[in-house]
Amino acid sequence: MREVFKNFAFVILILIAAIGFTACHRGASSNDETPDTSTYRPESTPATQFERDLKYVRDAHFAYVWVFTRKDGKELTPEDSDALHTNASKVVDWVKTDQNRVIAGSNFPLEGPQLAALQKRFKIEDYSGK
């Protein structure tokens, strides 16, 4: 009986050792371990200050993005700023950029009377969803 127990213990010990060695063994190295970078395309840096400012406002994920410039092409004045803030009161983000432009971001549309007042004074370009 003792001989059977020794043989049984020896077989169990061999099995444990075999399992231990095979469990820690890594499979053959393959190319599957390297990440797939074929679809990665880094974004290029916008070329102009206006494009960088526009990207900044777009990255905020506003539903509406507008660019305001004076119709006469002159530099924006404090009165222009007051008119913008008064007639576009729901705009959350204002960015004054080069070439006398202001970029505005909002989640609410410009309403009729306010839009009409702004259109009298400013050229409005809609960049929403572009």
Image (cartoon, rainbow, N blue to C red):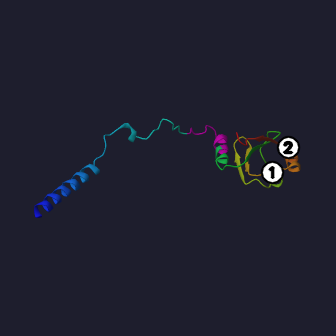
Q: Which residue is mark 2?
A: 119
Residue 47 position, x and y percent, is 61, 37
For the point 17% across and 60% down, which residue is it? 9
Q: Which residue is mark 1?
A: 84
Q: Amino acid at mark 1?
A: Leu
The disc, 2 or 1, on the residue closer to the chain's N-terminal end is 1
Proximity of marks 2 and 1: CB atoms separated by less than 8 Å: no
In the image, 73: left or right of 120? left
Graded by Cα atoms within 10 Å as few (under 14), some (14 to 19) or many (20 or more), the crowding at tag 1 reads many
For the point 31% across and 43% down, which residue is it? 27
Which quadrant does the N terminus fall into? bottom left
Residue 63 position, x and y percent, is 72, 48
Label 2 secondary element: helix
In the image, 37: left or right of 18? right
Q: Is residue 29 above or below residue 60?
A: above
Residue placed most toward the observer, 113 or 86 = 113
Residue placed most toward the observer, 84 or 78 = 84
Residue 22 position, x and y percent, is 26, 49
Residue placed most toward the observer, 51 or 36 = 36
For the point 37% across and 37% down, which residue is it? 31
Magenta region: 43-54
